[in-house]
Amino acid sequence: MIKFRVALLGVAVSVAVLAWTVPAMAHQGRVAATVTVTAGSPAEFKFKLSAASVAAGVVTFKVTNKGKLAHDFQIGGRKTPLINPGKSNTLRVTLKKGSAAYMCTVPGHAAAGMKGTLKVT
């Protein structure tokens, strides 16, 4: 009887450990996406993104301003501070499946072409 209880306890502990570690292991396989964003190049009022689509979840945007004017980058309800020419900033956003509009919020910049849509799969 004691051997049975010890074996049963061992099985219960094994199940508990698996229930705790399997979800954690599943998240380890996911790699958060990183998108490089160039502002002001090749034209002052354009963004160039390194990817046309990303997987849903946490996405890091590394924004570099190669233009001559200050710009910012807004996506997913968040935005960078103003980025001066030659400077960079990083923005982490959680995106849901669908599409995510991005833009520069400096007055007149989006109207001049600093906007677009990123596909989120």
Image: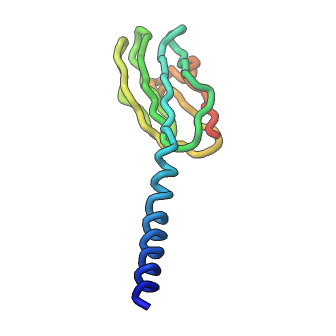
Residue 98 rendering spot, x and y as whole percentages: 65, 42
Indicate the quadrant where residue 115 lies. top right
Residue 22 vs 30, above or below: the answer is below
Image quadrant holding the C terminus, namely top right
At x 55% / y 22%, what residue is drawn? 49
Residue found at x 43% / y 85%? 5
The foreground one among 50 and 13 is 13
Q: Residue at x 57, y 46 (%)?
A: 96
Q: Nearer the viewer, residue 54 or 80?
A: 54
Question: At 62% across and 26% down in the image, what residue appears?
Answer: 52
- Which quadrant holds residue 106? top left
40 relative to 26, above or below: above
**Residue in the foreground of this view, choosing between 113 and 73:** 73
What color scheme is it?
Answer: rainbow
Number of numbered markers: 0
Q: Is residue 46 left or right of residue 61?
A: right
Q: Position of residue 1 (x, y in %)?
A: 44, 91
The percent position of residue 40, horizontal first and vertical second, equals 48, 13
Q: Position of residue 57 (x, y in %)?
A: 52, 44
Residue at the extreme bottom: 1
